[in-house]
C-alpha cells in the first residue's frame, strides 16, 4: 500500500467501531439543538446530527474532534434523540455523513417523521445516494483547503432543486478559483451558490467587496454561530 492510500485508510479506521453493526448503528459524535449557522437556512433553530469520521483534512477544519471521537448509536436511538428536541429542521453533518452505511436510511426515517432534512457533505462522494426530499449542501473544496483533488465534480450535475453549493475561501486566489468555476459551469443559474470566508482567514467585508465588484450572483455565507457564541464552543 502506498503512502497516500495508507493515510486514507487511517482516516477511516474509526469506522471499525461499527464492525458487525453496520446494519443497525451509525457512528455518532453528537446530537444537539442549536441555531443553523450557515446556508440560506441560517438563523433557524435546528437539530444537528454530527457523524464521526472524515476522509478529508481541510486546512480550516473546525471540527477535527469528529475525525475520531464518536460511538456506535442505534438508528432508532438517533431518530428518537432528534425527535425529542421537537425542532422540525434537522441537519446531518460530520465528519462526512456519506461515509455512514445507514445514512440514507436515517434520512428516510427523519423525512417520514415529518422533518425537514439537510445534509452537509464535503463533496468527495457521490451525492446520488441522498434520498429524494433531502436538501444537500455540497461543499466544493478550494485549493486552499488542501483537498481540492478530492472533489467529485460529477456531483454538480446531480444537484436538485433546493440544494446549495458552498465554497469556503482562504484567500483571494481561492476566490478567483471559485469565481471561474462558478462562471464556467453557470452555477448561479443552476443553484444557490454560497461563498464563505474561512474564519479569520478572510475578512467578511473584503469578500463582500469582491462579490459586489464582480457581480457574481453568489451569496455571502458567514458562520453565524461563531458570532453568537465563542468560536471554539462545541455543541452549537
Image (spheres, grey):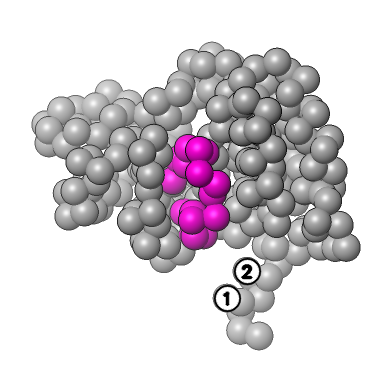
Image location of residue 72, percent across then percent down? 84, 47
Q: Position of residue 109 (x, y in %)?
A: 69, 38
Placement of the N terminus among the 4 image quadrants: bottom right
Disc 2 on helix, strand or loop?
A: helix
Residue at 73% of width from left, 23% of height from top? Answer: 83
Q: Residue tagged by mark 2?
A: 8
Can you see residue 15? yes
Q: Quadrant of the C terminus?
A: top right
Residue at the far right: name it. 20
Which residue in the rendered view is the most extreme toward the front? 112
Number of marks in picture:
2
Q: Position of residue 230 (x, y in %)?
A: 59, 19
Camera-side residue: 122 or 208? 122
**What is the span of residues highlighted in magenta in the rendered image?**
123-138
Q: Is residue 130 magenta?
A: yes
Q: Secondary structure at mark 1?
A: helix
Observer-nearest residue: 131 or 14?
Answer: 131
Give the alpha-carbon distance from disc 2 to disc 1, as whole Å: 6 Å
The residue carrying pointer 2 sits among few (fewer than 14), some (14 to 19) or many (20 or more) residues within 10 Å by Cα, namely few
Instruction: Tell me what residue is drawn at x 51 percent, y 59 percent.
Output: 125
Q: Is residue 205 left or right of residue 35?
A: left
- Residue 214 point in image, percent of width and height: 12, 36
**What's the residue at 49%, 60% (across, down)?**
126
**229 w.r.t. 183: above or below:** above
Q: Residues within 10 Å of mark 1 (few under 14, many from 20)?
A: few
Picture quadrant where residue 64 is located: top right
Q: Is residue 38 magenta?
A: no
**84 horizontally vs 212: left or right:** right
In this rendering, does residue 65 appear at all?
no
Residue placed at 27% from the left, 23% from the top? 205
Residue annotated with mark 1: 4
Amino acid at each position: 500500500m502506498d503512502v497516500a492510500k495508507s493515510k486514507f485508510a487511517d482516516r477511516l479506521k474509526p469506522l471499525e467501531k461499527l464492525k458487525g453493526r453496520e446494519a443497525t448503528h451509525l457512528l455518532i459524535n453528537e446530537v444537539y439543538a442549536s441555531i443553523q449557522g450557515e446556508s440560506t437556512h441560517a438563523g433557524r433553530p435546528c437539530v444537528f446530527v454530527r457523524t464521526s469520521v472524515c476522509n478529508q483534512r481541510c486546512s480550516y477544519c473546525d471540527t477535527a474532534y469528529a475525525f475520531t471521537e464518536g460511538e456506535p448509536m442505534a438508528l432508532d436511538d438517533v431518530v428518537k434523540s432528534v425527535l425529542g428536541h421537537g425542532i422540525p429542521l434537522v441537519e446531518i453533518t460530520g465528519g462526512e455523513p456519506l461515509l455512514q452505511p445507514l445514512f440514507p436510511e436515517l434520512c428516510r426515517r427523519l423525512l417520514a417523521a415529518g422533518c425537514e432534512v439537510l445534509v452537509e457533505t464535503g463533496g468527495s462522494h457521490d451525492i446520488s445516494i441522498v434520498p429524494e426530499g433531502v436538501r444537500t449542501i455540497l461543499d466544493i473544496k478550494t485549493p486552499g483547503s488542501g483537498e481540492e483533488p478530492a472533489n467529485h465534480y460529477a456531483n454538480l450535475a446531480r444537484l436538485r432543486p433546493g440544494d446549495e453549493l458552498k465554497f469556503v475561501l482562504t484567500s483571494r486566489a481561492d476566490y478567483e478559483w471559485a469565481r471561474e468555476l462558478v462562471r464556467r459551469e453557470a452555477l448561479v443559474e443552476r443553484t444557490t451558490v454560497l461563498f464563505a470566508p474561512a474564519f479569520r482567514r478572510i475578512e467578511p467585508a473584503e469578500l463582500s467587496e469582491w462579490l459586489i465588484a464582480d457581480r457574481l450572483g453568489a451569496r455571502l455565507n458567514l458562520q453565524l454561530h461563531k458570532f453568537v457564541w465563542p468560536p471554539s464552543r462545541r455543541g452549537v
